[in-house]
Image (cartoon, helix red, strand yellow):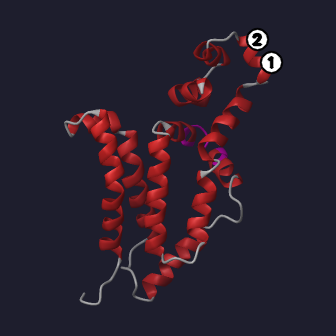
Amino acid sequence: EAARKVFIRDGYNGARMQDIADEAGINKALLHYYYKNKESLFNLVFDDAFASFVPKVHAIFSGDASAVEKLCNYVAAHVELLLQKPDLPIFVVHEIHRDPDRFFASFLSKMPGPPPFASFMSQLMTEMEEGKIRKMDPRFIWMNVMSMTVFPFVAAPLMSRMLLTDEDTYITMLKERVQSIQQFIKSSLLIHESN
C-alpha cells in the first residue's frame, strides 16, 4: 500500500525505496529484506492494479456480443475499477509517459489469451459495413470511450470544484454516469430503422 501511494504520487522514476519505507513506517533495510528492489515492488503494484481487470477486458472483447454491447460492458467494468482505485489513472499516466512499450507489454502479459483489440476493431468495421452502426474511424470510438471513462477520475479535484460538489456527491455522480455514458454510446453509434 505504501509503495502504491509513492508510485502514484511520484511515478516509477521519482519513487525511492527510502520514500516507500518512510510511507510504510519501517526502515529501509527491512523493506529491502522483503523486496529486493524498486522493480519488484512496482510489479506487485502493477499486478494488484490490473490482475482482475485485464481478464475482464479480455472476456468482454473476446465475447459474442455486439460491438456496442461490448463497449457498454467495458464502460461498466472500467468505471467499477476506477471507483475502487481512483488514483489508478494518475499511476497509468505516469507509467505511459515513462515507458509506454513496457506498460503495454505488462498490460498484455495479464491477458488470459490473445489480445482482442484488433479483432474488436475489425468487428466495428464489419458492423459499420453491415449498417448496424454509424461509419466513423473506429480509433475515434475507442478514444472517446477512454476519454469519457478516464478523464473524470484524472480531473476529479478540478471537476468537483467546477460542479460545486463535495467528494461524496462527485463519487455518486461518477457511479450514476455509467448509464449516461452507455446511453451516449448507443445514441451515437446505433443506426435505428427510422434514420
Q: Residue at x 66, y 42 (%)?
A: 47
Residue 153 image point, x, y percent: 39, 42
Amino acid at the residue labelled 1: Tyr
Query: Which element type, helix, strand or loop, lies under badge 1?
Result: helix
In the image, which disc is placed on residue 125? none
Look at mark 1 in the image and give the residue it sits on. 33
Look at mark 2 in the image and give the residue it sits on. 29
For the question of whether residue 28 can be seen, the reply is yes
The answer to whether the residues at label 1 and label 2 have Cβ atoms under 8 Å apart is: yes
Q: Residue at x 31, y 66 (%)?
A: 184
Q: Residue at x 31, y 36 (%)?
A: 168
Amino acid at the residue labelled 2: Ala
Q: Is residue 27 magenta?
A: no
Give the extent of the magenta segment.
96-102
Q: Residues within 10 Å of mark 2 (few under 14, many from 20)?
A: few
The secondary structure that most of the magenta stretch takes on is helix
Please state if 11 lies on the left or on the right of 143 as rendered.
right
The image quadrant of residue 181 is bottom left
- Whether residue 134 is situated above or below residue 77 in the rendered picture: below
